[in-house]
Amino acid sequence: MREQILSVLEDNPAYGHRRVALALGIGKKRVRRVMKRFGIKPTKRKQHLRKRRDERNPPAIYQNHIKGLFPIVPDITYVGDFTYIKYKEGYMYLATFMDLFTREIEGWSVSSKHTKELVLDALLSAFESTGYKLPKVVHTDQGSEYNCKGYTDFAKYLGITISMSKKASPWENGYQESFYSNFKTDLGLEFDRFNSIGELVEAIHQ
């Protein structure tokens, strides 16, 4: 059992006992017991992208509409954000939208630039994956990509309520912050191991 667990963690170093159990198709209590006995722990990563350019911008006019909100059905509330992935001599940017009820990523997009097109492509991807079931609320931070007229006008046109975290309050979008921390650990800390952008995007998709 110890060797089986280590084999799973070799490919997925951030997996805790629950996801290891799912990968092996056995009980999580059994996996947790073996991991504790042999001192086997998943890799954890603590790193956060500070959007310094946005810190100098004035506060957005949009309020936080999801504070204290706990959806009981899917396709009602999305939370969105983007992160950077250092690759070779530059960066790639990943934007995602998560369903707050299911905690699943419904839409995502990758680009070499963090622009409104990056986040709009991710939002459109979410609509496509859900059969165009439009959410009632979409929550993000106050980044210029989300606060620009192109993004806000599109959301308003679709009848979506725009929600934003208070300025310099990343914990108000902790769902995405937590996802990206685990995601990058799952993807692997050495992104330069990919031989091409195509390989990197394929790994992100997986």
Image (cartoon, rainbow, N blue to C red):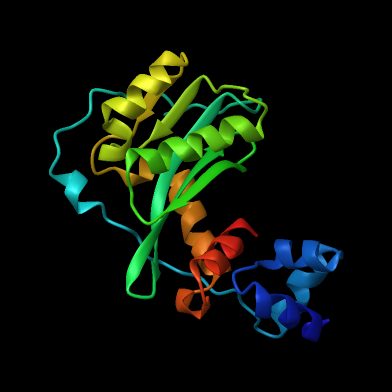
Question: Which quadrant of the rendered structure holds the C terminus?
Answer: bottom right
**Residue visible at 15% across and 39% down?**
57
Q: Residue 36 or 152: which is nearer the viewer?
A: 152
Q: Residue 35 or 153: which is nearer the viewer?
A: 153
Along the horizontal axis of the image, is 1 left or right of 168? right
- Vertical order, 5 against 156 (above or below): below
Along the horizontal axis of the image, is 202 left or right of 56? right
**Residue visible at 79% across and 61% down?**
22
Q: Residue 63 or 69: which is nearer the viewer?
A: 63
The percent coordinates of residue 166 (x first, y second) are 27, 34
Count the labels in the image.
Answer: 0
Q: In which quarter of the image is residue 103?
A: top right
The percent coordinates of residue 32 (x first, y second) are 74, 70
Residue 37 seen in this snapshot? yes
The percent coordinates of residue 97 (x first, y second) are 51, 40
**Residue visible at 65% across and 83% down?**
39
Q: Quadrant of residue 28?
A: bottom right
- Vertical order, 156 against 20 (above or below): above
Q: Residue 133 or 74: which is nearer the viewer?
A: 133
Residue 100 seen in this snapshot? no
- Vertical order, 59 against 12 (above or below): above
Furthest toward the right, the residue is 26
**Residue visible at 79% across and 65% down?**
23
The percent coordinates of residue 29 (x first, y second) are 79, 65
